Amino acid sequence: MADETTTTESTTTETTATETKGADTTASETKGTEATTETKAAETTETKSGEETKGTETKAETPADYSKLTLPEGYKADDPVFGEAVKLFGTEKIAPEVAQKLIDFTVERDKQIAKAVNDSAAANWAKQTTEWKENAAKEFSAEALGDAKTALAQVFDKETVTYLESMGFTNHPGLIRGMVKVSKAIKDDSWVTGNAGAGGARDARSQFPNSNMNP
């Protein structure tokens, strides 16, 4: 009986060991299957990702259409600067709607800069002509200023005088000085269109006989 019991226990032990090995083998196979499945899933994901990337690259390589970009009044599409801008948009792959915003911003900025420059120039010119006027008031008497104004009307036509006044040049001491001399010459009867007394009338033709402006 003892031998039979020992034999039975031995058989039972071997059976248990065999089952354990089988279980280990099954677990190992399961792990292998899971690993294979994960690998395939990763490969599938990479493939899809690669395909999506290729699709994106294909779309990016399609040239953008900038033909519908609009320019403000006064600007022309054949302007070299605009042409260079379009090239830059294409090189940097800038979307047309973004390019339009950049154009609008740049044009508006340029207008603001131009306005600032013009306003500054106008302010400086106004300051300059005011200084001329103040200096002329100190240098010349009221009579001299009146004589200069009269002489100015005799030397220049009305349109020119109006222009000089609008620009502030009639306040320039140098111009006033010259007109005072002209006024004095007229008063002294030494102006080319003045009277020559007993010697008879003189005009520009007698002063400049070789001029091609003589009739």
Image (spheres, rainbow, N blue to C red):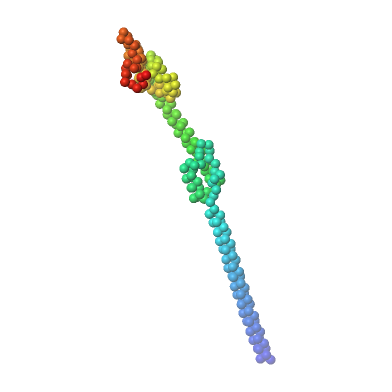
Residue 78: horizontal and vertical position, in percent? 49, 42
Whether 167 is drawn above or below 73: the answer is above
104 with respect to 129 (left or right):
right
Q: Residue furthest right?
A: 1
The residue located at (48%, 41%) in the rendering is: 79
Q: Which quadrant would residue 203 be assigned to in this image?
A: top left
Residue 28: horizontal and vertical position, in percent? 60, 75
The quarter of the image holding the C terminus is top left
The residue located at (53%, 45%) in the rendering is: 99
Residue 150 in view of the camera: yes
Residue 12: horizontal and vertical position, in percent? 66, 84
Residue 165 in view of the camera: no
Whether 144 is drawn above or below 129: the answer is above
Q: Nearer the viewer, residue 107 or 135?
A: 107
Q: Residue furthest left?
A: 199
Q: Nearer the viewer, residue 38 or 98?
A: 98
Whether 64 is drawn above or below 1: the answer is above
> How many callouts does the rendering have?
0
Q: Which quadrant would residue 23 be assigned to in this image?
A: bottom right
Q: Residue furthest front?
A: 215
46 with respect to 3 (left or right):
left
Q: Which quadrant would residue 169 be assigned to in this image?
A: top left
Residue 103: horizontal and vertical position, in percent? 52, 42
68 with respect to 199 (left or right):
right
The quarter of the image holding the N terminus is bottom right
The residue located at (66%, 91%) in the rendering is: 3
Q: Nearer the viewer, residue 184 or 48?
A: 184
The residue located at (35%, 13%) in the rendering is: 194
